[in-house]
Image: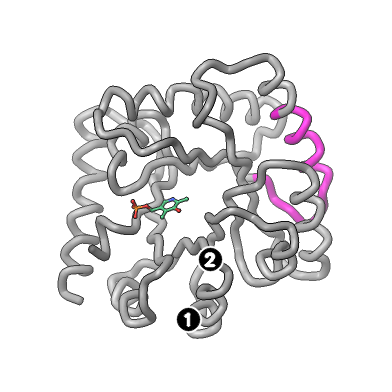
Amino acid sequence: MLKIQENLKKIHEKILTIRKKYYIPQKKIKLLVVSKSRSIQEIQTAILCKQYEFGESYIQESLFKIKTFKNIKWHFIGHIQSNKTRIISTNFDWCHTVKNEKIAKKLNKHRYNIAPKLNILIQIDIRDNFSMSKINVNNFKNLIKKIILLKNLNLRGVMGMPYKFIHYNDQVKSYQNVPLYFSIMKDIHPDVDTISIGTSHDMQAAIISGSTLIRIGSYIFD
Ligand SMILES: *Cc1c(COP(=O)(O)O)cnc(C)c1O
């Protein structure tokens, strides 16, 4: 468990080093601790190290963790199954992986009467198209316009999950369109503030591409 403490310290130092080296202007880069498949004890250790935001991908294992720890912000970062929207909407504070209007509407419906609103990120498709096609951009704009009409959701930004590239240049390339998508979103809805990109293996590429929230699991726990 000492290892978790050391790794968290290292990661905060690493963020600082990257920011200094590349003159990264963002006010804040949030560290989301990805605790999927990690034990209650491991999460407890991270909380003792003052980490208060955690990311989970699997509903089944996340509910017990959410019940166990109070005053934590829980982010759902997994694939959303349509029949799990109620559980996500009533248990989590954030949902990073909204890809279509149908899912957004369901999350909105189930968040009824629960304050605050559910924070939402639109997951952009950066896996298959490195170039931004007109169709993709139009679909993206339409989805934004639909989501901001949903009263129980708070659209906060974009999320991206590329393939795992080994080489740094490929990692940077995989994120190249993310700032463009974010600025399109910001033109429509100026309140947005979050770019959720970056995992243990491509932190630096994500940060220089404008990340405001990195999602880190294995670097902390393995
Ligand atoms: C597991 C996961 C992460 C964390 O990846 P690590 O390589 O363990 O840092 C980040 N984002 C998503 C969507 C994940 O599923």
Whole-angstrom CA distance, mark 2 to mark 1, is 17 Å
Q: How far across and down, in percent of the image, does residue 89 sit?
A: 70, 64
Q: How far across and down, in percent of the image, does residue 39 sit?
A: 36, 78
Answer whether residue 141 is magenta in the image: yes
Q: Is residue 46 left or right of residue 62?
A: left
Please tell me in which quadrant of the rendered image residue 204 appears: top left
Amino acid residing under circle 2: Tyr
Q: Is residue 207 left or right of residue 55?
A: left
Callout 2: CB less than 8 Å from ligand 1: no
Amino acid residing under circle 1: Phe
Residue under the image location 47 percent in, 61 percent down? 55
Q: Is residue 94 above or below residue 24?
A: below
Callout 1: CB less than 8 Å from ligand 1: no
Residue under the image location 48 percent in, 81 percent down? 69
Mark positioned earlier in the residue sequence (2 or 1): 2
Crowding around mark 1 (Cα neighbors within 10 Å: few <14, some 14 to 19, many 20+) is some
Q: Are marks 2 and 1 in contact (CB under 8 Å)?
A: no
Is disc 2 placed on a helix, strand or loop?
Answer: loop
Q: Nearer the viewer, mark 2 or mark 1?
A: 2
Please tell me in which quadrant of the rendered image residue 122 appears: top right
The colouring scheme, among rainbow, by chain, secondary structure or one colour, is: one colour
Q: How far across and down, in percent of the image, does residue 30 sit?
A: 40, 51
Q: Nearer the viewer, residue 156 or 170?
A: 170
Residue to which mark 2 is pinned: 58
Residue 1 bears which disc, if any? none
Residue under the image location 51 percent in, 61 percent down? 57
Q: How far across and down, in percent of the image, does residue 186 sit?
A: 63, 30
Residues shaded magenta: 140-155
Residue to which mark 1 is pinned: 69
